[in-house]
């Protein structure tokens, strides 16, 4: 499965806000074995959002959109998605119920209506509850295309993704992804010529061209690592694929430079 991340918000284009959502989602999707070939940022403009969607679905199966679900006039992502997928705007009553305390304190009818706008969702979609804000997310499936709509506020987006989107993606899949990290000595215990990213990559050579499992060196917050990742029907099969490649990698790097082997991620279901 190929995904594209679309971040909506003029404030992102102006540099007023750092786009941490795209970084987070890219990492999550990679861990799930879903390829992200493009990230797109677009302003709050109906025509440009539509053109971005047209381009995205010409090269991806799944679009994850963040931003533009709030109560203000420039929050137009929800309306654009409803139009693009030929849905109808409907009210998510559970979201309205969650708003009742706040709505009861508001006497300005215009403000009340703007907040109620947050509870509008596309018809015939999977509703993603927002336990940390007003606007629910949604998932739409249409003619082989999937669109996942999430809030732009990270403290709302991240828990919604983990609580609702990850289980959804897991149900789509047939295999699991397992990664092991070879953690190398730090520069206090070995020179850059021994454990630096470039010399390690040079020694790995053709192993970097391996498809399943894949082999990739990284400079990580934990130091220099080599990650080996396999796809298989279950964890045991994935580890069986990893083991011989793990030994080859340690042999060519030099076992004396290996500080440890760590399990980076839990297995996630992924699409064939």
Image: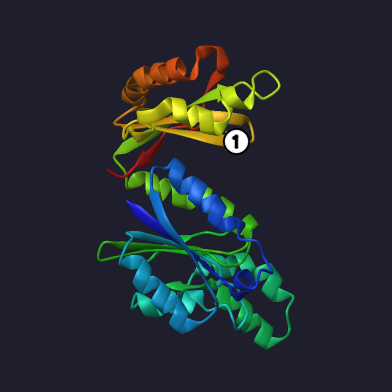
Residue lying furthest front: 193
Quarter assignment of residue 171: top left
Image point (40%, 55%), residue name: 37
For label 1, the SS is strand
Residue 120 on image: x %, y %: 50, 74
As displayed, is residue 109 above or below residue 133? below
Q: Residue at x 49, y 69 (%)?
A: 92
Q: Quadrant of residue 197?
A: top right
**Relative image position of residue 199 (x, y in whole percent):** 52, 29
Inspect this view and state whether residue 50 appears: yes
38 or 94, nearer to the observer: 38
Q: Residue 222 at what x, y percent from top left?
A: 63, 31
Work out whether residue 234 or residue 52 is closer to the camera in this orientation and state it.
Answer: 52
State which quadrant residue 152 falls in.
bottom right
What residue does disc 1 label? 220
Question: Residue visible at 34% across and 35% down?
Answer: 209
Crowd rating for badge 1 (residues with CA inside 10 Å; few <14, some 14–19, many 20+): few
Q: Residue furthest top?
A: 256
Q: Is residue 89 visible?
A: no
């Amino acid at each position: 499965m190929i995904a594209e991340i679309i971040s909506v918000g003029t404030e992102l284009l102006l540099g007023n806000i750092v786009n941490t959502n795209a970084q987070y989602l890219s990492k999550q999707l990679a861990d799930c074995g879903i390829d992200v070939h493009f990230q797109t940022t677009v302003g709050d403009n109906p025509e440009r959002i539509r053109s971005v969607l047209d381009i995205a679905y010409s090269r991806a199966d799944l679009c994850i959109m963040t931003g533009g679900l709030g109560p203000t006039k420039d929050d137009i992502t929800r309306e654009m998605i409803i139009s693009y997928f030929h849905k109808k705007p409907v009210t998510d009553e559970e979201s309205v119920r969650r708003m009742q305390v706040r709505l009861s304190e508001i006497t300005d009818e215009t403000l009340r209506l703007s907040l109620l706008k947050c509870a509008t969702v596309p018809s015939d979609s999977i509703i993603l509850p927002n336990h940390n804000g007003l606007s629910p997310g949604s998932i739409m499936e249409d003619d082989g295309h999937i669109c996942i709509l999430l809030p732009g506020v990270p403290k709302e987006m991240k828990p919604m993704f983990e609580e609702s989107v990850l289980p959804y993606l897991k149900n789509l899949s047939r295999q699991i992804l397992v990664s092991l990290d070879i953690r190398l000595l730090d520069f206090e215990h070995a020179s850059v010529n021994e454990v630096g990213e470039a010399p390690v990559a040079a020694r790995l050579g053709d192993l970097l061209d391996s498809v399943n499992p894949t082999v990739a060196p990284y400079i990580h917050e934990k130091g220099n690592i080599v990650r080996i990742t396999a796809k298989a029907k279950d964890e045991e099969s994935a580890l069986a694929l990893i083991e011989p490649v793990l030994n080859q990698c340690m042999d060519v790097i030099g076992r004396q430079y290996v500080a440890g082997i760590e399990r980076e991620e839990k297995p996630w279901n992924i699409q064939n």
